[in-house]
Image: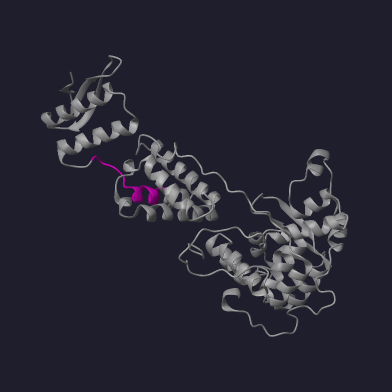
Amino acid sequence: MASVRRKRGSRYWFACFTLADGLRVQRSTKETDRKKAQRLADAFEEVARQQLTARQAQRIVADTYYRTTGNLLPATTTRDYFHAWLARKKAETATSTHIFYTGKARRFLDWLGERATNRLLNITPEDILAFRGSENDRVRSATVNHALKFLRMVFEDAKRDGVIADNPADSVRLVKAAQRRSRRPFSIDEIKQLLAAANEEWETLILFGLYTGQRLGDLARLTWAHIDLRNDELSLRTSKTGRQQIIPIAPPLRSHLTRINGHTKNCDEPLHPNAFASVIKSGKVGTLSRQFYELMAKTGIVPAKRHRTSANGAGRGGRHNVSQISFHALRHTATSLMKNAGISSAVVQDIIGHESSAISDNYTHIDEEAKRKALSAMPNVFDDADPPNGNKELTQTPELR
């Protein structure tokens, strides 16, 4: 039977109770009132003798504490813990990662609504499962799984911090990934259409995507300090792999850069000011990807997207379907064009930045001359036509500027 006692020098009553294996233990009740302390001791022993999950035990103790004292057991609300967790992670992660975490946290708290002000220990696996179902109706499976992995991480930290007894997201499985649609490269005619419709900044981004095969985020962050027109080289460190890339500048891209170089005032000036500002502010390329899609829709390469959610869930507020073609397709286009020109896979993959089995297995060194030859083999999209924005007045819509 549970009992209480005081220790010398302490003003609190200690609960004395027996565990299921017969071991007698003592725990402080943090109570100065003997009757209240006895009720807590009885609850401790009840929990100890029953086969309960950590979450059930935590709730029994919390409920007993409330009935005994009239106060909630000191605890953290879901919203407060998530905000504190984000503040802690800000010093531990890259800006783009913290922005990603913030977005996932905001989505979960918005889904909880008023329940976000309840205690974190009240979140159950059923809540996580319901959130998973809600997200699965709204976004792609990969995005749903990103959210679940984020929640597992947050609740695991809460468990480690002693705020909760177990992780409610651990038992919720990831959703099955939908079959990915095959991506296709652009045709040369499509690239010419895009260049004809683009303003100068997007024209430059498209040419860089085609003639370097680099990712949109890395190209958006370029400044003139990355460009060496004297040696016809582009140098950058990729954000995804951290790989240092030195890429010869293809002749058509060099001609374009020479034409626009007179606009610059110093080497730290971004090549693509609007794209640079967008990526630095958000840490992501979502806005740029949307603008590029609108540019493709303007030329008829893809169907236009509705801005508002329709009755069947279509539009930007509905479930997102991955397009078969995007800015990333320029990476596929560059690869295809060089391979079709007879360039070896090792050289192509070194330029694009993929880890090449030919390079890693045989320790092959790709020299600069081989890369220059490969890029020179690519077609000039300005052939048989004037540079798209050479002398014409821009009439781009605000969304695409």
Image location (x, y in percent) of residue 317: 48, 63
Left or right side of 335 for 96:
left
Residue at the extreme front: 312
Left or right side of 198 for 356:
right
Image location (x, y in percent) of residue 69: 15, 38
Q: From this view, report whether residue 185 is shown above or below residue 190.
A: above
Q: Is residue 265 visible?
A: no
Which quarter of the rendering shows the C terminus? Answer: bottom right
Image location (x, y in percent) of residue 117: 30, 51
> Residue at horizontal 82%, vertical 65%?
250
Q: Nearer the viewer, residue 234 or 205?
A: 205
Residue at the extreme top: 22
Residue numbers of the magenta segment: 73-85
> Residue at horizontal 21%, vertical 21%?
16
Image location (x, y in percent) of residue 398: 57, 78
Left or right side of 52 for 268:
right
Looking at the rendering, which quadrant does residue 341 occupy?
bottom right
Q: Is residue 83 magenta?
A: yes
Q: Is residue 382 magenta?
A: no
Q: Nearer the viewer, residue 341 or 100?
A: 341
State the scheme by which the image is colored: one colour
Chief secondary structure of the magenta span?
helix
Q: Is residue 391 visible?
A: yes
Q: Nearer the viewer, residue 47 or 272?
A: 47
